[in-house]
Image: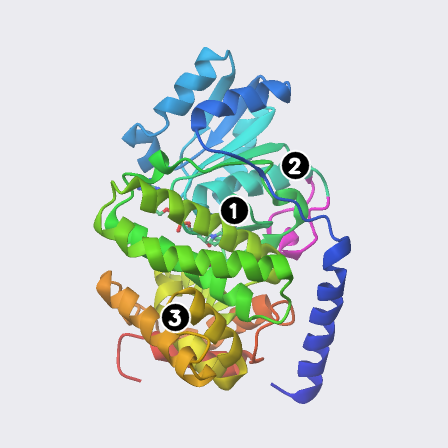
Amino acid sequence: MNIIIKAACRTFQTVLRLAIPILPYRSPKVLSRVEDIPGVLKEQKIHRVMIVTDGFLHLSGMLEPLKKALSEAGIGYTVYDETVPNPTVWNVEIARERYLAENCQGLIGFGGGSAIDCAKAVGARIARPRKSIPQMRGILKVMRRIPFLIAVPTTAGTGSETTLATVITDDKADHKFPVNDFPLIPRVAVLDPEMTRNLPAHLTATTGMDALTHAIEAYIGRSTTKDTRADALEAAELISKNLENAYRDGNNMEARANMLRAAFLAGRAFSKSYVGYCHAVAHSLGGKYHIPHGLANAVLLPYVLEAYGETAYKKEKDIAVAMGIADSSTPEETAAEALIACIRKMNADMGIPTKLPGIRTEDIPQLAAFAHREANPLYPVPLLMDAGELERFYYDVMEEAK
Ligand SMILES: NC(=O)c1ccc[n+]([C@@H]2O[C@H](COP(=O)([O-])OP(=O)(O)OC[C@H]3O[C@@H](n4cnc5c(N)ncnc54)[C@H](O)[C@@H]3O)[C@@H](O)[C@H]2O)c1
Ligand SMILES: [Fe+2]
């Protein structure tokens, strides 16, 4: 990246970092059972809600405890269940029409990051009827209170239940982008491990690696605070102790609960301290080829950390220590290498591949341009790269030989 653009990026990031204390960050109220949701809705005088979920979760019967609790409390609901993985502008618009037609007063995002993000984006469109979702791309474009939003994660990964982001795919342009603003932070997050009990092993693995990516990208970036550093390190420690246990035995509810907490902490960390190039590249792959978000991050993470090189050694050592694979006497470079090797081993042990299918050479310049547009100047990464430099990651993870 040229030196003038680098300086401009760093200045932009410094301004945002200095603004952290005056920006309206907040953390959602945390509940531990879906059965406690009606009480909160009653406090808010909400009598009818829209549950935003996906078809599989609806059919699986996982919504039943929530539906029963709402009915018993006399709270009406309608269910929008067409959310797709990597949710689209179309999903959001159809769900919004339903919300308005049914006179709903609040939203419950029930599912993985896709359903929760869809609910957030519906909220943004209700608050901003004249602004399309693509017009809200980037930061601080919602700027108005959205309807009361409760998030019930059924994966332990995205942390969307506490973040200020929603990531939506423009189905017309095969382009996926985040919308980041404070009103999108859910008012309530329900961390109920029962909701993740049936998450299949491969999704447990990839969504858990998404959470680890959040913790690492937030920690090694240059806009951390004492709180985000503590959250990120605790998340990394919890993930190293619990993810493989949850992967091997989905009924290990202690591991499930710890993974939900880890995803929440990592989400809270990156809400203030941002993600990095791993996410920007993963979003471009999700938008173009519908590669699942957690899978893309898991595969990309070791390559991106390698590319940061010595600029991230010191912080990578802290993470390695938190994960129990280095100690204070380990040289920084050795600890950083141990962290990257550990991520590769976790991936391998959980059946996550080292390459991603379907990437076409001719698409790479445009994908890298999307990643560049998402990340620069916003993400305070340890080492700045422009679109040309980001292209390497697509070649790194492509299935075919270069
Ligand atoms: N808003 C944010 O801060 C943020 C952060 C990271 C990622 N994301 C976004 O979140 C999305 C990915 O979310 P995700 O990784 O949670 O996956 P997902 O929501 O796309 O779900 C993946 C699959 O898992 C299934 N599933 C979910 N929970 C299940 C359960 N308990 N049992 C069985 N099946 C279950 C779903 O039906 C779906 O088929 C992406 O669009 C990504 O960009 C958002
Ligand atoms: Fe993510």
Kind of element beneath mark 1: helix
Residue 44 shows up from this direction: yes
| Discs 2/1, front | 2
Quadrant in the rendering for residue 100: top right
Q: Is mark 1 within 8 Å of ligand 1?
A: no
Measured as percent of width and height from the top left, residue 222 is found at 62, 71
Relative vertical location of residue 281 with respect to residue 250 in this rendering, above or below? below
Instruction: Using residue 376 as the reference point, say whether residue 19 is left or right of it.
Output: right
Which comes sooner in the sequence, label 2 or label 3? 2
The residues tagged by marks 3 and 1 sit, at their Cα atoms, a distance apart of 26 Å
Relative vertical location of residue 126 with respect to residue 165 in this rendering, above or below? above
For label 2, the crowd category at 10 Å Cα-Cα, with few meaning under 14, some 14 to 19 and many 20 or more, is many
Quadrant in the rendering for residue 282: bottom left
Give the residue pinned by disc 3. Answer: 300
Rendered residue at 42%/45% (across/down) = 260
* Segment tinted magenta in the rendering: 128-143
The residues tagged by marks 2 and 3 sit, at their Cα atoms, a distance apart of 34 Å
Task: Please tell me whether residue 134 belongs to the stretch shown in magenta.
Answer: yes
Measured as percent of width and height from the top left, residue 173 is found at 50, 59
Which residue in the rendered view is the most extreme toward the front? 329
Give the residue pinned by disc 2. Answer: 146
* Amino acid on which disc 2 is placed: Ile
Between residue 146 and residue 171, name the one nearer to us.
146
Give the residue pinned by disc 1. Answer: 89
Rendered residue at 50%/83% (across/down) = 389
For label 1, the crowd category at 10 Å Cα-Cα, with few meaning under 14, some 14 to 19 and many 20 or more, is many
Which comes sooner in the sequence, label 3 or label 1? 1
